Each structure stands twice: as C-alpha cells, then as structure tokens.
Image (tube, rainbow, N blue to C red):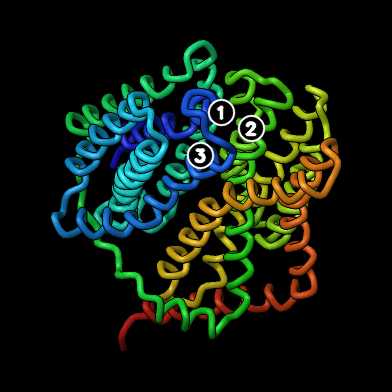
C-alpha cells in the first residue's frame, strides 16, 4: 500500500489554524474585546475543555456509522464557520462560548484524521504498515509540525489581528473539500471501549505508571503557561509584534516536532527514562530562565534550548507509558495518558494567570514574572528530582512488562502441537 500523502498533508494543514491565532490573542481578547488576562486564559483553556469532552463522542459516532471522511469534512466546514464567527462577535461571553464549540469541533477533525491513520496501521491487509507504529509516528510528527508552522504565520495579523482567523477559516474549508474529494476510508478499525476499571487495574499492578502520567500533565501544564501568560509578557512587556512572537513560541514547538523520530531512535540505546529525565530537566531550567531576560538573542537562545529539551523528552515520555503498561492494557493506558495531558493543558493558562496575580501582589514588579516563569520551570525540575530515587525500580517494572509481552508473543506464535 502506498504512503498516505493526502492524509498526512491534511493532518498538517488542519493544525495551522489552531496556532496561527495564538500570536494575536492579546490583540483580539484584550484590545478588541477589552478583556483581561483571565479572558486570555479562558480563551486558551476553553477549547481544550471542548476537546476533552467531545473526543470520545467523535470516535463513538464515527465508529457507529463506519465513516471518517464525511464527518471530517462536515466538521471542517463547521469549524471554518466558527472561526469566522469569532471575528464578528463583540460580546465576551458569547465569544468564549463559540471558542468552546470551536474546540469541540476541531477535535472531531484531528481525532478522526488520526483514527484514519490508525485504520491503516490496524488493517492486517496492509502488510507495509500493519502493527509497526510507523504511520502513527509520522502522523504525530506532522501534527506537531503543523502547530509549529502555524505560530510564525501569526505575522499575518500584524496590521489586522482578524486576518489569521480569516485565513484559518479558509484553510479549514480547503481541508474539508480535499477530504471529500481525495480521502478514502480504509478498513475502519473500531477502538476498544475505554473503561476506568481497566486503568485502575493497570495502576494497581504498577503504581509507577503515575510517573509518565505526571510528566505528561506537567509538560502540557507548562505549555498552557507559555501560550497565555508568557505570550502576553512577550507582547506587552517586550513589545513583540505577532510575527516575532510566533517565531519565538515556535522555537519550543519546532524542536519538539523535528526531534520526535531521532529521540525515539536514540532511546533504543539509552532507554526511554534517561531521555525523559534529561529532556525534562533541560526544558524546566531554560523555561525558568526564559522569564528572566529582556535581551532578544538571549531569550532566543533560552527558548531554543528549552525546545530541544522538550523534543528530547516528548516521544520518550509516551514510550515510557506504553512500555510500563501491562499487556492488553496499552490502549487504555495511552488513552488516559492523552487525557491527563489535555487536562494539564486546560488548567495551565488559568493557574498561570492566578499565580501571576499572587507574585505581582507579593513581589517587586521586576521580580514577579521571573518568579512566575521559574515556578513553572521548577515543576519540571522537581518532578525529575522526585523520580530519580525510583530510577532502578522503574527500569525493573519496564523489564517485567516487556518480558510479559515477549512471553505472550511467543505463546501466540508457537505452533499448536
């Protein structure tokens, strides 16, 4: 079976509108609608709530009707309309309601595009990709790359902050039409139903599963800080226009995308846990430092190294959760892993604004934002320090789980006598 170029391209394009509007959040929410930092936090958090609530619904509906393409196309058109509607509304409450619906709509697009990739990997007739994880890895990389490329496109809003919304709406219409014309459903694979009891059993048998869950929660939690409070800091304190802001925020996302595959390869020699710890430590240190400087190139350097740290630990943290899962519970474990990350991303902006108020009330102005930045950086550093004493025990749990999988594989492949 040929490589699904169309599917990968649609995944990439569908992520552009999501991050394209991040550099103009301040212009839209604070300047145009006269909102506060709280509304900026809600603007970045509330679509994640929509995604969190409606992600399972997308899968259930698509599986029941045995169709991906028509649902993807329909929600592309709906999402495009909601993006346009965000430029027309002037009431803040209605604006945030539409933003919630936009997040719910977009998860249908992303979730079902990823399901289409999973369909190909879970199709036994697909000898090239069946069970190898290649397609999902490549799809995940282009999902991240779409988000990374979207950030610098915020420059479109330098003179008119509504333009990224218009362009994003146009991109979604293009993705919808391309889906209808070019995308083909192939052997839809119905995912097993997620059950909390399965996850409870998995954690009871291996409490160290909390480790990758906590890392993913904190990783996404800190990203919430980056796209809300840090975003506003770069715009208002440092005076960056949307284009420069997009480039700087992209410094974190680009390495995360580009280093996904190399870090997975490197983990075969080093193991996944060392990469998670080293990458998280580097990410935490330089995230903290990024809030301490107003110097253009020093900030550029800090964020670049921060992005490298994120890239080193991003895929290994997923692999850590997968490797520590007992056989038969991998899908359940990874569903919970993803859900915990979404929860962290949703809470990050709100907590960052609250903590910013706390630091501003108790510290001199010049120290309040550096303290906030180090607060989020120390969450990563502290988690690394808490994990190190259990390093050998976690490795032992990984070895036990891998031996169980090998034994099951061997038993299933042995000829019946």
Which residue is at the front of the view, 350 or 197? Answer: 350
Q: Quadrant of residue 277?
A: bottom right
Per the rendering, the mark at residue 144 is 3
Of labels 3 and 1, earlier in sequence is 1
Residue reaching furthest bottom? 417
Q: Disc 2 and disc 3: Cα gap in Å?
A: 23 Å
Q: Percent position (x, y) of residue 160?
A: 47, 14
Q: Percent position (x, y) of residue 326?
A: 49, 77
Image-based side of 156 in relation to 110, left or right:
right
Q: Percent position (x, y) of residue 196?
A: 40, 76
Around disc 3, counting alpha carbons within 10 Å, would you say few (fewer than 14), some (14 to 19), or many (20 or more)? many
Image-based side of 198 in relation to 73, left or right:
right
Residue at label 1?
Answer: 26
Q: Residue at x 16, y 59 (%)?
A: 64
Q: Secondary structure at mark 2?
A: helix
Q: Secondary structure at mark 3?
A: helix
Contact (Cβ within 8 Å) of mark 2 with mark 1: yes
């Amino acid at each position: 079976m040929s490589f699904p170029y169309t599917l990968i391209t649609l995944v990439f394009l569908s992520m552009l509108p999501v991050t394209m509007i991040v550099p103009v959040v301040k212009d839209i929410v604070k300047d145009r609608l006269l909102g506060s930092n709280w509304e900026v936090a809600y603007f970045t958090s509330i679509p994640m709530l929509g995604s969190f609530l409606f992600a399972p619904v997308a899968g259930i509906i698509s599986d029941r009707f045995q169709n991906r393409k028509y649902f993807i196309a329909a929600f592309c058109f709906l999402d495009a309309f909601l993006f346009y509607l965000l430029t027309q509304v002037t009431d803040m409450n209605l604006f945030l309601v539409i933003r919630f619906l936009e997040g719910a709509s977009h998860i249908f697009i992303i979730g079902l595009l990823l399901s289409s990739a999973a369909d190909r990997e879970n199709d036994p007739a697909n000898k090239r990709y069946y069970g190898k994880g290649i397609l999902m890895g490549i799809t995940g990389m282009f999902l991240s790359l779409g988000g990374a490329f979207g950030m610098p496109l915020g420059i479109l809003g330098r003179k008119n902050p509504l333009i990224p919304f218009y362009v994003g709406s146009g991109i979604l219409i293009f993705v919808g039409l391309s889906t209808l014309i070019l995308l083909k459903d192939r052997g839809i694979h119905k995912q097993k139903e997620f059950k909390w009891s399965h996850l409870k059993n998995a954690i009871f048998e291996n409490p160290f599963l909390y480790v990758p869950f906590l890392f993913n929660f904190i990783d996404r939690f800190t990203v919430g800080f980056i796209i809300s409070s840090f975003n506003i800091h770069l715009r208002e304190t440092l005076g960056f226009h949307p284009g420069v802001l997009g480039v700087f925020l992209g410094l974190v996302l680009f390495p995360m995308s580009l280093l996904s595959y190399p870090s997975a390869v490197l983990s075969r020699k080093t193991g996944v846990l060392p990469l998670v710890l080293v990458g998280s430590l580097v990410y935490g240190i330089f995230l903290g430092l990024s809030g301490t400087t107003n110097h253009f190139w020093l900030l550029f350097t800090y964020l670049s190294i921060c992005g490298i740290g994120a890239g080193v630990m991003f895929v290994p943290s997923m692999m850590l959760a997968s490797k520590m899962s007992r056989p038969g519970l991998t899908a359940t474990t990874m569903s919970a892993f993803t859900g915990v990350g979404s929860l962290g991303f949703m809470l990050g902006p709100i907590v960052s604004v609250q903590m910013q108020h706390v630091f501003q009330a108790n510290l001199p102005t010049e120290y309040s934002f550096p303290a906030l930045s180090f607060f989020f950086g120390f969450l990563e550093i502290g988690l690394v320090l808490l994990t190190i004493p259990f390093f050998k025990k976690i490795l032992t749990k990984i070895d036990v789980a891998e031996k169980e999988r090998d034994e099951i594989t061997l038993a299933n492949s042995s000829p019946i006598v």
